[in-house]
Image (cartoon, helix red, strand yellow):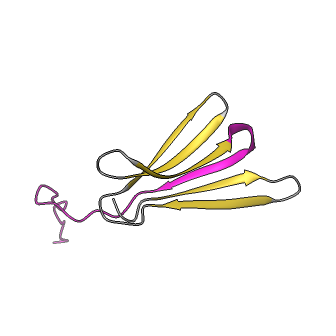
């Protein structure tokens, strides 16, 4: 959903570099997959079509931080009962 974003920090020799992949439109999400030494971060539409992809060597990835989009309150979400001092 719009607002999903993933930060990727990689080792670039003597320094680090930070990349961000963000879901830019409503209905899109950001998926992370890894395998065979590659970390792949993809912005995907509702139908599953990849819009853009970033690939990194897994050995160089220092951190991968997922920031999900904030969700609204649902009717099922209840606030915990408040305790009052007597």
Name the foreground residue: 18 vs 23: 23
Name the foreground residue: 65 vs 2: 2
Q: Residue at x 36, y 64 (%)?
A: 2
Q: Residue at x 75, y 44 (%)?
A: 60
Q: Quadrant of the N terminus?
A: bottom left
Work out which residue is located at the far right of the displayed protein and give it.
14
Name the foreground residue: 75 vs 86: 75
Segment tinted magenta in the rendering: 57-86
Q: Position of residue 42 (x, y in %)?
A: 49, 49
Q: Position of residue 28 (x, y in %)?
A: 35, 57
Q: Position of residue 30 (x, y in %)?
A: 44, 52
Q: Position of residue 17 (x, y in %)?
A: 73, 60
Q: Is residue 65 magenta?
A: yes
Q: Residue at x 53, y 48 (%)?
A: 41
73 left or right of 61?
Answer: left
13 left or right of 68?
Answer: right
Q: Is residue 22 above or below residue 49?
A: below
38 left or right of 23?
Answer: right
Q: Quadrant of the C terminus?
A: bottom left
Q: Main secondary structure of the magenta part?
A: loop
71 left or right of 82?
Answer: right
Quarter of the image where one finds residue 57: top right
Work out which residue is located at the far left of the displayed protein and give it.
75
Q: Is residue 71 above or below residue 36?
A: below
């Amino acid at each position: 959903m719009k607002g999903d974003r993933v930060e990727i920090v990689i080792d670039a020799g003597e320094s680090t570099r930070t990349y961000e992949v963000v879901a830019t439109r409503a209905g899109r999400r950001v998926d992370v997959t890894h395998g065979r030494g590659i970390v792949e971060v993809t912005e995907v539409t509702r139908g599953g079509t990849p819009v853009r992809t970033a690939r990194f060597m897994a050995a160089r990835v220092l951190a991968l931080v997922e920031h999900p989009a904030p969700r609204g309150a649902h009717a099922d979400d209840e606030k915990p009962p408040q305790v009052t001092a007597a």
